[in-house]
Every structure is written in structure tokens, then in C-alpha cells.
Amino acid sequence: MHPHLAFTWQLTEIHGWGLVGVHTALHLLEQGRPPLLLERPLMNSLRPENREKLQSLVGPCEQTLALAAQHPGRLLRLREFDVLHALGNGFQAGPPSERFQGRRNIGVIAYEDTRFDAAVLERARRYERIIVHSTYNRQILEAQGFTNIGFALQGIDESELKVPPPSKRFGDRFVIFSGGKLEFRKGQDIVLAAFLRFHARHPNALLVTAWQNAWTEVGMTMAESPLAAHPPRVRDNRIDIRHWAFENGADESNFLDLGFLGRHQIAGILADCDAAVFPNRCEGATNLVAMEAMACGVPTILSANTGHMDLVVGDVCLTLDHQKPVPDRNGSRIGWGESSVDELVERLEALYTDRSGARARADRAQRFIRGERTWSIFAQSFVAAIEEGAGVAPTPPPTVPSSAPASPPQTVRIQDALILARHHHEAGRPAEAEDIYRRVLAVRPDLLAARSGLVRVLQAQGRSAAALTLGRSVIALQPKDVDGYVDLGDTLRRDGDHPEAFRLFRRAAALDPKSVASPTILHADDKAAAQGSAERQSPPNAGQWMDAPLTIIYRTRSHANDRLAGMRACLRNLVGTFAAPAGRLAVVVGDDDSGRGERIERELSGLSFHSAPLHIHRSGADEAASWRLALDLALERPDGDLVYFVEDGHLHLPNAECLLREGLGHADYVSLYDPPWRYRPAPAAGGAREAERTTESIRAARLLLTPSSHWAFTDSLTMTFAVRVGTLRQDRDVFLLAAEPGSSIAPSELFAELAARGRGILASIPGHSTRTEPAMLSPLVDWAAVAAASAEAPVP
């Protein structure tokens, strides 16, 4: 017997939660199972046809609320109902959940805050079952040990999205639509920044938005934007969207905000749009506005992160693949992604210049959304997910229209369907294989085996664009899936992008060296990939670095007192080793409450050489501020110069400068430090996370021999390294992650990102420099003797 269901949230057609309730209630009414509403529905927000169908639910709702009012402060248990509790971030429930409990209590949530402290875990464990609306949310819960998870993807109502012919209300403008309530998470600042650049190239472009936000405090989170100089402001209890956009560069001629749109207005507006953009930093579900744009046939651009990945099935949209981590001080933004403004401009250019390609892709998206992502399909999947944990035989899934791939027959297990699809592919029947893979993905969009199998089918058919889009979704869903990197690399190699393919192969090798052992991938049989490797390891003008100007930026940090050499000895060693003339050495002194900064400055000011004083620059006590100042000083130099960042507490051997220059002839980043945990992995100063990252990279390290040293290619360095200024400028966005106030990002994470971008990173073996903490010394050198000699030696 199917249980009766009760909802703790308000039915409305104004926002996503309300739509979940409306369409689930309509489905249950069709089944003869009217739900009990524990919050009064907002009937005047509903379309007349839905208002009529749902009217019968108002009476029982009023009776139940009246009964609750007769017993204030008491918890009412509805013994004949399974109660669905609407949960927000932190698994916080609303007031109705404090008054009503059911036979079973089911949590329903789409969350973006990924913190799971003890209190959050305690709240989450109160529910017999938790229903989520994205693979992203499910994977995070699984990582926390939850197994009682149901899954249902939200959708659209095709009956209300009847697209009329374009009205040409905007004339011949190239109209870019952006929807979703204004907030930092939704990324409207990225939209605006990219649009202004695009508009400078194409003055006929017009940005049309539906950004109004009824929750002003949420809208004010946009003050965190790194792109918008001016935060939004509230006027008449609303976010002043126009003022915010105009203060940040838009004007009346290129920007139009439509305010709150009624359900009846959406299709007509979208019919007049040429593109829709959603560079959202995070989506706990799948983004209803994006699905509506796709359902209306608008060429769409999505950020390749979080809930959006459940929409990236085949070549149905353009994706923003370059996703940087969003600053995260407390673990609340795991998986969030910062899209590249430059990449969004490129994607808009692609839609602008290739209208026929954009139309074909939009048509595929329209068929996909209207065929597989409707509210009716959602409602049946949602109810089935609720009942799955109650010992109820699930209702068969809805019949999918013939215009879209159907779900696999229930008599066929998914594993059997995957085997059958693989057999079709191997037998030369790609169409049959593709059909089965798409059927599986219709019910399990998170299944990596189906996505990867479909990637290979698309590769075999020469459909590179679709294979690339789907391949990137595999990596985004599972960043440690080695096969995903190899498959995507194969696609890029076939498409002629050998440098990018080789970068992905190197990333796969870092995860599992055996995965790319084939000579066709990393060696001479693949001439283009091998050439890319050779270019990275032996630049054609390797000798140019021997004479390039070198600036040393020496940065003080807070270290333990137990060090082999003091600050003065380390600085004398540096000046003596590099024979630094005036202008080549800058010192960044971090200050703090103990006056340590003043003491260091007094000692350093007594050192001079070549009759010129040191250049001393003061930053705040915060490590991020110190690094930001050092980075800014380096970027003041010409692109052809070299810069060597040195943290205090380091010693160098006499030939250090020659080795740095030699290494930069073979890689982008060079370090002379050989950390001891390379040989005996253990948590060190960077903590267990950094040690694990370093150990993983060393297992896949490749060796290089130059005239003066052995080297290891790696993706894990400390913040003492050398680089060409032009390279540093290109990678500035990565290093700015360490310059965020309160940043806790480990250096190994920065260099792992650089390695993933294809940067060559070298460390000398054995080390020709060392940190001076006794547990951190580079092996095989008597560093105590070096320290003693440095303390006694005169400064040049």
C-alpha cells in the first residue's frame, strides 16, 4: 500500500520549492492520492488550471492547521502520513517541521552550503530518508556516509512553455538572457563583466535579465564579487538591479532588467533571445531557469560545476570548463566553481559567429529537456524515491515521448544494459549503443560508466564537440576518474589539440602512472604529443634564461624558533650565493603585534652591498597580504625577466643561481628544495593533506638530467620557486587564491592546478637549497656547515 504524503512547504508557482510541491501534488491527485498540505498554498500565484485542480487540498489543510492552533507548542504526529520536510542549507527545517512529524519523516533538500559539522550531521540523521535533486548533492552526502538517499531531477512544464514566434520586440539586437535571483552564488557579476567586453566588440548586443530577488539579504552577498567594484543596494525593500548594473559599467542602451516575470511571460521573452548564460558558482539542484531557456530553444552556456553537470548530457549546450575554486574559508563551498570571464566571452563569440551551429545545439537541448526533464517525470521519480525506502514497490517510470531517448525497460538491469551497449559498440553498431547509453542516462545521469561509454561512441562517430562536452562532464563529476582524463585526451588528440590532450594524459599519469603507460600516449608513436612534451622539457631557446635579468623577492614568514640558521645567516647566504647587486633583491616584511617586523627591518637595514641599501617593503601580518605584495612586486617586472621567490629560513649552495637558470630552460617553474617527505611520506608543515598530495605526485614523477643536476618533474612545490615573469602573469589567477584574506590553500594545491593546466614543474634532486627546520632539511648535504659558513662569511 502506498503511504499518504504530507508537505511542509507552500505550494506556489513563484519559486522552485513551490513548483516542486505543485507538480508533485498534481501527480498524486492524478493517482487518487491527495497529499496533505501543512502550509497554506499561495493559490493566487497559480495558473487558473492548476488552481482549479489543487483547490480540493485547501480544506484539509485548513482543518489540520486549525487543529494545530488548538495545541500551541505541541508536536503533532500524523500517524497515517509520511511527512516531507523542506530543508535549507545546514539541514535547517522550517516552522511546520517543528509542529508536525509523520509515520516516516523524509528530508527534501537542494543545498549549496557543504559544511557538515556535528550539528549539521545530527540534524541530517533525524530523517529516515533524504531526497536530493542533483548528483552533486548526492555525492557529498555519500562522502559523509549517508546511504538513505533518494534522487529526482527537477524539470519544466512543457504545457506552459509554448514558444511563440519571435516578436522582434528588441529589433535586430543580439539578445543575451540571464535569469536567476541576484546573488554571489548565481554569478551575475561574471555575466555583466563578460557582457561588457562582448558589447565592446558587438555594439548591437543587449543584455536582458530577470535578476530581481525577493530576499534582499541574499542579494547583498554580491558584495563579495571580485569583479563588480560596487555592491548592490536596497531601495524600497528591493535590490536596485539597474543601479547595480549601471554602477558597474552597463547603461540604458545595452541593459534591460525585466524584474519579476510571471510564468505566462517566460516563453515569450525567451523566444526573442539569441543566447542564455548561466555562469553560476554553485547549484544545489539543476537550475530551473536554465532548463526553461533550453526548453524554449535558446542556445545556452552553462558553468561546468555542481548541479549543472546533470544538464550536460551530450552536445546540448556550451560549457564553461575553466573552473577555479571559489575562496572557501570554512568548508562551505566544496565543489563551487569560478568561471572565467574570458572563456564566457569566447563562448558568446561562438554563438554570435556560428548561428547555424548554435541553432542545431539548441534544438538538441530542446528535445532533451522536453523529452527527459519535465515536471511530470520528476514527480513520478520523486514519489518513487520516497517510497523506495518504505518497502513499497515503486511505480513504473513514466513513458518518455518517442522524440527523446526512453528509460531502459524495468526488466533490464542497468548493468546488463551497459554490457549490451558495449557489445553494440564493439560490433560496429554505434547508433544502437548510443540509444542504450542515453536511456540509461535518462534515469541515472550521474552514472559515470554510461557517460564514459557514450563518450567513446561519440568519438567513434567523429562527433568531437559532443564527445568533448560529455567528457568534461565526466571529469567534473569525478575529478579522480583516470579513464575520464584518458578518454577526453583521446578526443582532443583526434581533434588536433595535442597540447591539451597531453596535459590530460599527464593528469591521468599523476593519478595512476599505469593508466598512460602505452607508448601511443606518452612516447614516440604519438609524434604530436611527444613534440608537445619535448617543447615543454626543452624550449627551443633554452639558453635565453642564462642571461635574463633575475629579481629575488625575499619574504619573511612566521616560523618555529627551532631552526638551523637564523634570519641574518639565511639572508647573508642568499646575498652571497646570488652576488645580488642593488635592484636585484627586494624584501617583503610581514608585521605583527609582537613587533617582529620592526626587529627584522632593523637587522636587514644594516646589510648593504655595492653601496646600495636593500629594498624593504612592508605588508600586513596576514600571510595572504605578504604573498599578494610579493606577487605584485614580481609582476612589475618585464615579461622576459626571471623572478625567484624565497621564503625566509632557507639556505642555498653556491651554484644555486646557475641551477635555477638551467632548470628554467626545461620547465615553467623551478625549485631547488628537495623535501625529505619525498622519501618518507608523512604529514609535514603543510599537514596531512599536503603530504598526501606530494606523495601522490612523486609516485608519478619523471626524471630529467641536465649538465649540472638531476631533476624530477612534479606538481608539488613550496612557495620558494623561480619562474619567468610572463608565465607568472599568465598564471596570476592561480596564485591569487593564496592572496585571499584568510586563505588556507596549500602550495601543493596551487601547483597541482598549474600542472593540470600543462605547466612543467621541476625540482632538483638532491636539493641545492633547504628549509632550515631540522625536520625539513634537504637530504645528503651538511647544512649545518653551510649555515655556520654563512654566519661567518662577509656580505659582498
Image (cartoon, rainbow, N blue to C red):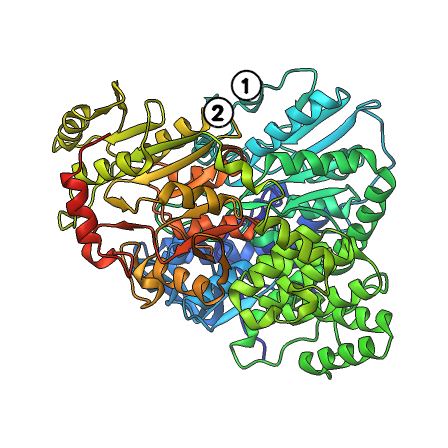
The residue lying at 81 percent from left, 48 percent from top is 361
Q: Which of the labelled discs sits on residue 232, or is there none?
A: 2
Q: Position of residue 412 (x, y in %)?
A: 73, 83
Left or right, 356 with reference to 102: right
The residue lying at 67 percent from left, 69 percent from top is 519
Q: Is residue 33 visible?
A: no
Most extreme residue toward the top is 252
Quadrant of image for the N terminus: bottom right
Q: Position of residue 179 (x, y in %)?
A: 64, 37
**Tag count:** 2
Q: In the image, is residue 572 above or below residue 655?
A: above
Cα–Cα span, label 1 and label 2: 8 Å
Quadrant of image for the C terminus: top left
Q: Earlier in the sequence, mark 1 or mark 2?
A: 2
Kindly check if marks 1 and 2 are in contact, taking CB atoms under 8 A apart as contact.
yes
Residue that badge 1 annotates: 243
The residue lying at 22 percent from left, 56 percent from top is 782
Q: Nearest the camera: 389 or 741?
A: 741
